[in-house]
Image (cartoon, rainbow, N blue to C red):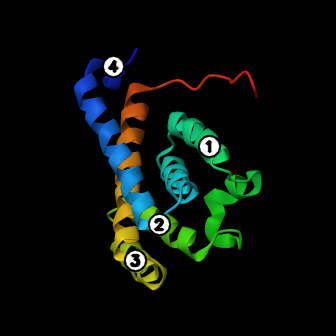
Amino acid sequence: MRIFIDKQSPKAFHALVQTSEAVRAVAAEAGLDRIAVELINLRVSQLNGCAYCLDIHTRAAVRAGESAQRLGVLAAWRDTEVFTPVERATLALAEATTDPTDAVAQQSAYEAARQVLTDDQISAAIWAAVTINAFNRVSILSKHPVRANEST
């Protein structure tokens, strides 16, 4: 059985939670709405295979007003027309942040982002991706369980 590192080291986890709260505030101040942030959280969690974070952030996205259609096609967002230019730019940045070894994707994402996002929005999107990547590692390495919801 694995250690739940968030429970084993609560001070470190609390610092990560505080960082996440600060990033959410920065995103809102920059003009990125909650849905854009949740799309980042979901896409990064898809790439990392974090079931626990996918569960949490799918529910958060629905509460924020996200549609089932967009949630269903998020993994193939480039092949759809359902995401706004701002969302597409933040998703590309999120993917580039999650795989920092792909310099071409990073450059392409950054160039595309410069066309539709402010510097504050670019920074907020990258911070959102950095933060959810950290939470993914905590949950994956702790093997946090996903249990059935009463409403599902």
- Give the image location of residue 144, x and y in percent: 47, 25
* Residue neighbourhood size for the residue with mark 3, other residues' Cα within 10 Å, grouped as few (<14), some (14–19), many (≥20): few
Between marks 2 and 4 in the image, the one whose residue lies nearer the viewer: 2
Q: Quadrant of the C terminus?
A: top right
CA gap between label 4 and label 3 equals 37 Å
Give, as a three-letter code, the residue at label 2. Gly
| Residue at mark 4 | 7
144 vs 14, nearest the viewer: 14
Give, as a three-letter code, the residue at label 4. Lys
| Residue at mark 3 | 118
CA gap between label 1 and label 4 equals 23 Å
- Give the image location of residue 117, x and y in percent: 44, 77
Is the C-beta separation of discs 2 and 3 under 8 Å? Answer: yes
Give, as a three-letter code, the residue at label 3. Thr
- Give the image location of residue 149, x and y in percent: 69, 24
- The vertical placement of 71 against 106, above or below, is above
- The vertical placement of 11 against 123, above or below, is above
Give, as a three-letter code, the residue at label 1. Thr
Q: Which mark is residue 31?
A: 2
Decide if residue 130 is on the left or right side of residue 62: left
- Give the image location of residue 29, x and y in percent: 40, 62
CA gap between label 1 and label 2 equals 21 Å
The residue lying at 36 percent from left, 34 percent from top is 138
- The vertical placement of 151 against 115, above or below, is above
**First of labels 1, 4 by sequence position:** 4
Residue farthest along the front direction in this orientation: 29
CA gap between label 2 and label 4 equals 34 Å
Question: Is residue 99 visible to the viewer in this orientation of the structure?
Answer: no
| SS at mark 2 in the image | loop
